[in-house]
Amino acid sequence: MKNLKKYYKMAAVPEDVYAALTNPFTIELWTGEKAVMSQEVGSEFNLWDGDITGKNLAFEAGKSLKQEWYFEGNEEAEASIVTIKLWEVKGGTSVELVHTNIPDEAFENIEAGWDDAYFGAIEKLFEV
């Protein structure tokens, strides 16, 4: 199991980045797929037609979210936890991503997915 910590900068205020991470309608704008997402702690989420699934563990509106991600075949492993924190900075938002307990065989795809499909797509959503 591996851990990942990365930083991103978004050209939008933290509240808008938070909406892009938690509002199913906004998620559908940048993924192009139906999204199941709720800001209710304990609710299940589903992105990219089930490619990413898990449980929402904690929310602080406009500031952070914490999720448990499910990996097929790893039900016995320690939970894979995603924590995203947002800070307002000049010109937008600084994003801190911490993803723990990523299965070794999935690490490269997960890291590329965060850069390209996830935060890369959100960044494009906010381009003028």
Image: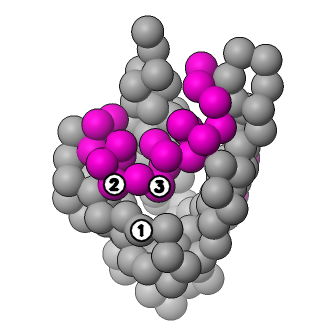
The answer to which of marks 1 and 2 sits earlier in the sequence is 2
Amino acid type at mark 2: Pro
Q: Is residue 5 visible?
A: yes
- Residue 24: assigned label: 2
For the point 79% across and 25% down, the residue is 89
Residue 12's place in the image compared with 17, above or below, is above
Task: Give the colour scheme shown.
Answer: one colour
As for residue 123 lying within the magenta part, the answer is no
Which of 69 and 121 lies nearest the eye of the viewer? Answer: 121
The magenta segment is 1-30
- Residue, disc 3: 22
What crowding class fits label 3: few (fewer than 14 Cα within 10 Å), some (14-19), or many (20 or more)? Answer: many
> Looking at the picture, which amino acid does disc 3 mark?
Thr
Where in the figure is residue 39, as x and y percent of width and height?
49, 68
Q: Residue at x 39, y 36 (%)?
A: 117
x%, y% of residue 49? 20, 58
Amino acid on which the number 1 mark rests in the picture: Ser
Q: Is residue 4 visible?
A: no
